[in-house]
Amino acid sequence: MNSTGAVLLVLCAIAPLALPARNIPKWKKQACELPQSADSSSHYVCDESGEMQCLPGWTGDMCDVPICKKGCDPLQGYCRRPGECRCKLGFYGEKCDKCIPLPGCQHGYCNSSFECKCREGWDGIFCSEPVCRSDCHPQRGYCEGPGECRCRLGWAGETCQDCQVLPGCQHGSCSRPLECRCNEGWTGLLCQTAICSGTCHREHGYCKKPGECRCKVGWWGNDCDECYRYPGCVHGTCSRPWECNCEAGWGGMLCDQELTYCKDNGDLCENGAKCVSLSEEDGNYRCVCTEDFTGRNCEVPKLQNATSPATTTTTAPAAPATTTTAAPATENEAAPPSRRKSKIMKWN
């Protein structure tokens, strides 16, 4: 081989490496085969050299991929035409960069779709259960918000460790829920009644605190066992409030009249009768007769008009004798002065 042939052989060997190669895919050649024009639904045009040029907003080998809105999340977003941003299931927002939490999630957030990560102080699948105060009793307490400690019925205290007394319990304590154990000096279902002093009269006295003795209206004394006499009563006593029972030798409404009528008027009562002085309105005196006499002054013998043998006469019968018998003395009139009662004001 001569030198000229050798040179040609070398040039042929290196020529393919030096010249630019145009490796156009067959489908691309068919898309822009001259002089064929682009289809109306295509998103490209063909230049003079047969190359595809994508229309604005489209990309890809066949210019069939729309360019989404700027900033649209490449993973959670997509588009079907240029400039839009559609969100995949579980995401939302203009750029589809916000996740949708698990439906029902109350106090939580998400980093991925349908997730419910609880905020501080909340727990549970839906983050709906508050985390109570750390020292709150797990059975006796509960909470409606983070860090709280509310007590269930029957328990009390900051951490619900203490029992709660029966509602309305005034002076009592408890060793178990809803109990009312009375403190010393108190009694009753709600420990509301004070125990009075041991000698305080049960009916006439009362107390507002243990060990005392207060008297009801009309009574007085350390034990409330003494009654108040009728106002103005001088020489009288009482067995209940506002009475004035006269002492011996005294009468009148206020027992202020000294009864001396028998003393001042001697020999009023006859036949051994006893004279009892009375007040003027009661007749001044009363005679207490012996068994054989009667009458105002005990001057009439009880046997004076006793039945005697009949006497037969021829004369007209005389008018029957009229015997006057004094009315028996009433209890107050016949009673000794120490037992007579004056007029009193009744106490209801």
Image (cartoon, grey):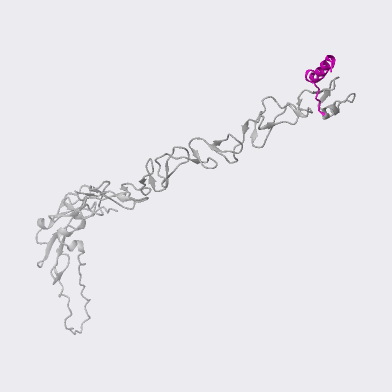
245 is within the stretch colored magenta: no
Q: x%, y% of residue 27?
A: 83, 30
Q: Main secondary structure of the magenta part?
A: helix
- On the rendered image, what quadrant is the N terminus found in? top right
Would you say 32 lies left or right of 116 here?
right
Would you say 316 lies left or right of 38 here?
left
Tell me: residue 35, above or below residue 327.
above
Q: Splitting the image into 4 quarters, where does residue 113 fall? A: top right
Would you say 45 lies left or right of 241 here?
right
* Foreground pick, 27 / 121: 27
Q: How many marks?
A: 0
Q: Splitting the image into 4 quarters, where does residue 292 fall? A: bottom left
Tell me: residue 26, above or below residue 218.
above
* Foreground pick, 201 / 12: 12
Q: Which residue, as the protein is rendered here, is positioned at the far top?
A: 3
Q: x%, y% of residue 183?
A: 28, 48
* Foreground pick, 265 / 172: 172
Q: x%, y% of residue 280?
A: 19, 55
Write the residue at 17% across / 59% down. Answer: 339
Give the magenta range: 1-25
